[in-house]
Amino acid sequence: MVVRIPLAESAATVPDGYRAEDLAAAVAAAVRAPSQHNTQPWRFRLSGGAIEIRSDPARRLPIADPTGWAVRIACGAALCNARLALAGRGRPADGVIRPVPGKTDLVARLLPGTPRPPAPAELALLAAVPRRRSTRGRFSALPVPASIRARLLDAVRSEGCWLDLIVGTPAVTAVAEIAHSADRVLRRNDDYRAEIAAWTRPAPAIDGVPPEAAGPKTNPADILPRRDFGGAVAAPDPVREPEPLVAVLGSPADTAAEQIAAGQALQKLLLTVTDAGLAASMVSQPIEVPAAREQLRLALGRYGPPQMVVRIGYAAPGATTPRRAAESVVIPE
């Protein structure tokens, strides 16, 4: 669970603060986090012995993410990875310091806590960081065991967020209909489609989604919609899954801080999925359309807002998407 502490304007140098090698380890893990269209909207800085995580407003998607929600989710996921990397070095962060009002690009400051050996669970999740992929292909019909479902719920709750595992054909169908309806609304926008095309980038691009990682184009028979990153048209899958696992992750509120917390919870969920030998696909269309998001919240009977829909199951690993070099996302001290 992350501690949120107010940040004073006159933050002093941290005794026994983080060093350049700690920053390097944190950034190497943080940049492996997922982001919408693989925009990688983050920057990092060593300041007075603390590691700052900052958003990069220039990489916000103006059409798909007009409010900055997706940037905050991505930076929260990067924050989760950074925390794991520091814990793996025996120098865990003592708390995540919330930014002061007006510093809109400052996501968090990480201060070193009491040195300790990393816990086995932290090492397992850290090992999953380079193996995590967004799966845009098909899932098998194998059901996810109950023991793994319990681990997924615990992972999200440990970050102060909620996770609903959608059970039963009627419930899955209801969520799927909301997702497909939102996808149709988005695809009717020419600027939205142009934005996706602009971020569909073949090698040697250092960001965006390469065609080889796109997966097949969405099909009306698919359980959940896919974005069109240039994948091939695939025939409907003849094997219908008897119990597809669809999860909805949400937060208690919808402030900027809660969205960052949801990003941490999402990444912890995805790393737990990877550690368990499963695959996951994120579906944000019903979050991007306000009416669909509210419809989803009401269907789940939740007070807090949904922050992501996730498809979880057994599937072939997705292709690796590129990442910018660590030195290009570090702000000099």
Image: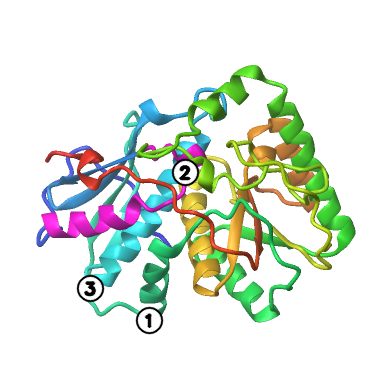
* In magenta segment, residue 25: yes
The answer to whether residue 256 of the structure is visible from this angle is no
- Residue for badge 2: 35
Q: Secondary structure at mark 2?
A: loop
Q: Magenta stretch: give its range.
A: 19-41
Three-letter amino acid code of the residue under disc 1: Pro
Q: Where is residue 280 shown, x and y percent of the image? A: 59, 59
Cα separation, mark 1 vs mark 2, equals: 27 Å
Cα separation, mark 2 vs mark 3, equals: 27 Å
Q: Is residue 317 above or below residue 194?
A: below
Q: Where is residue 244 shown, x and y percent of the image? A: 76, 63
- Residue for badge 3: 90
Using the image as rendered, state which of residue 234 and residue 50 is in the foreground: 234
Left-right relation of 22 to 83? left
Using the image as rendered, state which of residue 124 and residue 188 is in the foreground: 188
The residue drawn where x is 60% and y is 18% is: 191
- Whether pointer 1 and pointer 2 mark residues with C-beta atoms closer than 8 Å, the reply is no
Which mark is in front, 1 or 2? Answer: 2
Q: Mark 3 packing: few (<14 Cα in 10 Å), some, or many (20+)?
A: some
Quarter holding the N terminus?
bottom left
Q: Is residue 245 above or below residue 34?
A: below
Colour pattern of the rendering: rainbow
Q: Which of the 4 image quarters holds residue 14?
A: bottom left
* In magenta segment, residue 213: no
The answer to whether residue 287 of the structure is visible from this angle is yes
Left-right relation of 172 to 217? right
Three-letter amino acid code of the residue under disc 2: Ser
- Residue for badge 1: 120
Q: Give the mark nearer the N terminus: 1 vs 2.
A: 2
Q: Where is residue 9 shown, x and y percent of the image? A: 22, 37
Q: Give the mark nearer the N terminus: 1 vs 3.
A: 3
Q: Secondary structure at mark 3?
A: loop
